[in-house]
Image: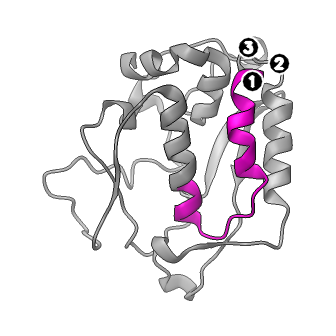
Amino acid sequence: MLIAKADEICIEIHETYPKQTYRNRCEIYSANGKLSLTIPVVKVEGNHTKTLDIAISDHQNWQIIHWRAIESAYAKSPYFLYYSDELKPFFEVPASNLIRFNTLLLEKLMEIVGLYKIVNFTGKYERNAVGKQDFREMMTPRKPFSMFGFKPYHQVFEYRNGFLPGLSIIDLLFNAGPETLQILLDT
């Protein structure tokens, strides 16, 4: 939603990598409610590693586990079969750098949705992003998404737990298909 409405997209890559954020995770709607999918990472320079340098751990089969969870959660959604072939390769080809993986996935999702924006990266760390909207601290799993006022849409498991806001865009994409961009802009 924020990216859809933004004039400019600038991703912070020079900060010291903060734990427990959405930089390496997303949440989907499974049969049992909200499910967090976390990419295992390696801080190559310990606690002083910049986000730019965060490596993806190859010690776990996270891509297989994530794709199986996505299939299980969305196989019965209206648009899973339509979009799954475009997203599945992200969970088959080995990935080594978190920023590279996230950027390629973000660009693919924007292409699918029909959102044509350029993704920029910071050139250096700025504690206060003067003259820009800064969402770095607002978007964490510890803070509720209620402040964003998500427009409800049909979700596969809504009948069990009601509408769950703030999930990965794949939830919206698999459930709303070609209406995804309009829902993002209307929210």
Residue 18 percent coordinates (x, y):
49, 68
Provide residue 88's location: percent of width, then percent of height: 75, 42
As rendered, which of 156 and 119 lies closer to the eye? 119
Which quadrant is home to the C terminus?
top left
Quadrant containing the N terminus in the rendered view: top left
Above or below, 143 relative to 171: below
Q: Report which quarter residue 101 is drawn in.
A: bottom right
Q: CA distance from mark 1 to mark 2?
A: 7 Å
Asked if 37 appears above or below 99 in the picture, the reply is above
Question: Which residue is tagged 1?
Answer: 80
Q: Mark 1 and 2 residues: CB-CB less than 8 Å, in contact?
A: yes
Prevailing secondary structure class for the magenta stretch in the rendered image = helix
Q: Which mark is residue 76?
A: 2
Taking the image as shown, residue 134 lies to the left or right of residue 180, namely left
Give coordinates of residue 72: x percent, y percent: 86, 32
The correct choice, above or below, for 85 with respect to 79 in the image is below
Q: Secondary structure at mark 2?
A: loop
Instruction: Name the kind of residue labelled 1 in the image.
Output: Phe
In magenta segment, residue 146: no
Whether residue 12 is visible to the viewer of this picture, yes or no, is yes
Q: Which residues are magenta?
A: 81-102
Find disc 3 in the rendering and name its residue: 78
Instruction: Indicate the quadrant where residue 33 lies.
Output: top right
Q: Rounded to the nearest whole Å, what is the CA distance between mark 3 and mark 1?
A: 6 Å
Which type of secondary structure does the marked residue at label 1 adopt? Answer: helix
Looking at the rendered structure, the kind of residue marked 2 is: Lys
Looking at the image, which residue is at 71% across and 46% down? 36
